[in-house]
Image (spheres, helix red, strand yellow):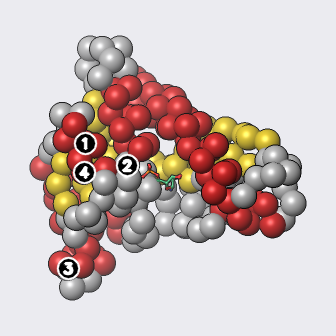
Amino acid sequence: MRKIRTAVLISGRGSNMAALATAAKSEHYPANISLVISNNPNAGGLAKAGDLGVTSMTIDHNQFSSRRKFEMALDAALSQAGIELVCCAGFMRVLTPWFVDRWKNRLLNIHPSLLPKYKGLNTHQRAIDAGDKEHGCTVHYVTAELDGGAAVLQYTLDIKKSDTADSLAQRLLPHEQKLYVKALKKVATELLSLS
Ligand code: GRF
């Protein structure tokens, strides 16, 4: 069975990446995790990728004189590896319209809120502070507007009275991982049907 060659971009611990790479090992999953790229040389996810037998590399944004040059290096590495679909998972760089346009409809992200609520950072605390009863996560297409692209899938979680930002983040994380596995399956299946 043909699988969509997929890369995961990370900056940190890489638990969503590990969930995707683990799911993709299954014969019938429609995507392969062919490459992991971190912009942070100290990302814990790099070791996780190694443990899972996935090729990884660091492209450190600090080594480039401009955002565009960093993104050109990223784009070149993805193209060289024959990547067809890119999943951002805890990737902490804002991508410019140039990059986003090159990967249009082939660039996903996971965001820890029920978008369009709480774009940007500190989503758990903001949901608690607003007195929300529900919180969640969204896998969405990346567009030039931060956390603004169309949703692929969402998961909703009840907020408990006792929740703190940390407890909420911790309770949400396993659901993020499952949601991303489902969303990548959906998008890769669609791409396979087009190819
Ligand atoms: C996740 O909570 C994700 O929603 C957010 O950053 C976190 C990344 O976690 N964008 P991990 O690196 O996948 O463990």
Q: Do the residues labelled 2 and 1 touch (CB within 8 Å)?
A: yes
Disc 3 marks a residue whose amino acid type is Phe
Q: Do the residues labelled 4 and 1 touch (CB within 8 Å)?
A: yes
Q: Do the residues labelled 2 and 4 touch (CB within 8 Å)?
A: yes
SS category of the residue bearing label 4? helix
Disc 1 marks a residue whose amino acid type is Ala
Label 4 CB, ligand 1: below 8 Å?
no
SS category of the residue bearing label 2? loop
23 vs 2, left or right, is right
Label 2 CB, ligand 1: below 8 Å?
yes
Q: Which residue lies furthest to the left in this view?
A: 80
Residue shown at 33%/17% (left/top)? Answer: 26
Q: Return the disc, 2 or 3, that comes first in the chain's sequence.
A: 2
Q: Return the disc, 2 or 1, that comes first in the chain's sequence.
A: 2
Q: Residue furthest front?
A: 162
Question: Is there any visible trace of residue 138 in the rendered image?
Answer: no
Task: Give the distance between the C-alpha atoms of the residues marked 2 and 4, in whole angstroms.
Answer: 8 Å
**Residue annotated with mark 2:** 14
Disc 2 marks a residue whose amino acid type is Gly
Which one is closest to the eye, mark 2 or mark 3?
A: 2
Q: Residues within 10 Å of mark 4 (few under 14, many from 20)?
A: many
**Residue annotated with mark 4:** 46
Task: Give the distance between the C-alpha atoms of the residues marked 3 and 4, in whole angstroms.
Answer: 20 Å
**Residue annotated with mark 3:** 64
**Residue annotated with mark 1:** 49
